[in-house]
Amino acid sequence: MIALWRSPKSSKSRQALALLEESGAHVVVYKYLAEMPARHEIEQIAHKLGLPPSAMIRMGEKAYSEKELDMVESEDALLDAMAEAPILIERPIAVKADRAVIGRPPEAVLSLLG
């Protein structure tokens, strides 16, 4: 099973979902903008990605500039910001067991197969 953190409005998310479904993967969709993940869940995803939280944040979002996150050096503060405003989390993110990948490009999610 692959959990896909996605936004229905995101073309990259739609492409990643289509690729996984076409490959025959069992996909569970997690609409994280509506279901708002807890901070510890975002931290777990960062760990599974093998990346610091700063590598999974969307810097082009309005919330990023409003919260002045470009001035923040603390990874903990970035986790807090993503928990408060999930729109800041890069998408899509595919998760399988103890591994995760950011679907940029969407084909990156295929690395979780097999």
Image (cartoon, rainbow, N blue to C red):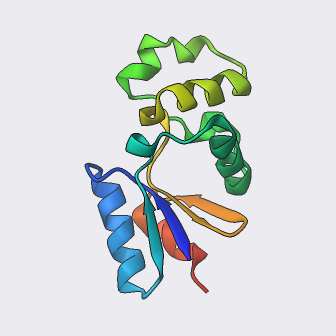
Q: Position of residue 64 (x, y in %)?
A: 46, 21
Q: Position of residue 91 (x, y in %)?
A: 44, 49
| Residue at the outermost front position | 35
Q: Position of residue 60 (x, y in %)?
A: 39, 29
Which of the image's four quarters has the C terminus?
Answer: bottom right
The reply to whether residue 58 is in sight is no
Which of the image's four quarters has the N terminus?
Answer: bottom right
Q: Residue at x 72, y 26 (%)?
A: 76
> Which image quadrant is residue 42 in?
top right
In the image, residue 72 above or below residue 45: above
- How many tags in the picture? 0
Q: Residue at x 34, y 57 (%)?
A: 12
Q: Residue at x 62, y 25 (%)?
A: 80
Q: Residue at x 65, y 45 (%)?
A: 41
* Viewer-nearest residue: 47 or 31: 31
The reply to whether residue 90 is in sight is yes
In the image, residue 66 above or below residue 103: above
In the image, residue 8 above or below residue 21: above
44 horizontally vs 111: left or right: right
